[in-house]
Image (cartoon, rainbow, N blue to C red):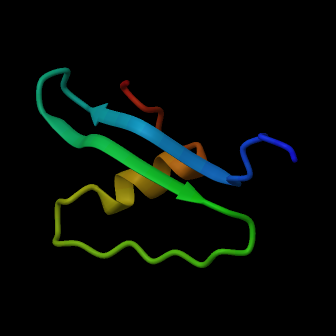
Amino acid sequence: MSTANKDYVSFQHVKKTYDGANLVVKDFNLDIAPGEFVTMLGPSGSGKTTCLMMLAGFETATG
């Protein structure tokens, strides 16, 4: 049995700040396996678009 990570996408304890002080994404964790369908829901300003921008490579995580 293989113990390799089977996740296709994995965010572990991701943080993002634009000004160095205010976190727009705080301790974000997400694992997506191949073939899974994911929907991100949340209020305006919760960091959904920022997380998708990091996933696409248009933004970098702060930590």
Which image quarter: residue 48?
bottom left
Q: Which residue is pictured at 18% across the width and 35% down the height?
A: 23
Is residue 45 shown above or below 62?
Answer: below
Q: Which residue is pictured at 24% across the width and 40% down the height?
A: 26
Which image quarter: residue 21?
top left
Is residue 9 shown above or below 16?
Answer: below
Q: Which residue is pictured at 85% across the width and 44% down the height?
A: 2
Q: Residue furthest top?
A: 20
Whether residue 61 sits left or right of residue 26 in the image: it is right
Q: Residue 63 placed where, x, y %? A: 37, 24
Whether residue 19 sits left or right of residue 55 in the image: it is left
Whether residue 13 sits left or right of residue 38 in the image: it is left
Q: Residue 36 placed where, x, y %? A: 65, 75
Q: Residue 29 placed where, x, y %? A: 40, 48
Using the image as rendered, state which of residue 17 and residue 5 is in the foreground. Answer: 5
Using the image as rendered, state which of residue 17 and residue 12 is in the foreground. Answer: 12
Q: Residue furthest front?
A: 1
Q: Residue furthest left?
A: 22
Q: Which residue is pictured at 49% across the width and 44% down the height?
A: 11
Using the image as rendered, state which of residue 21 and residue 29 is in the foreground. Answer: 29
Whether residue 3 sits left or right of residue 54 in the image: it is right
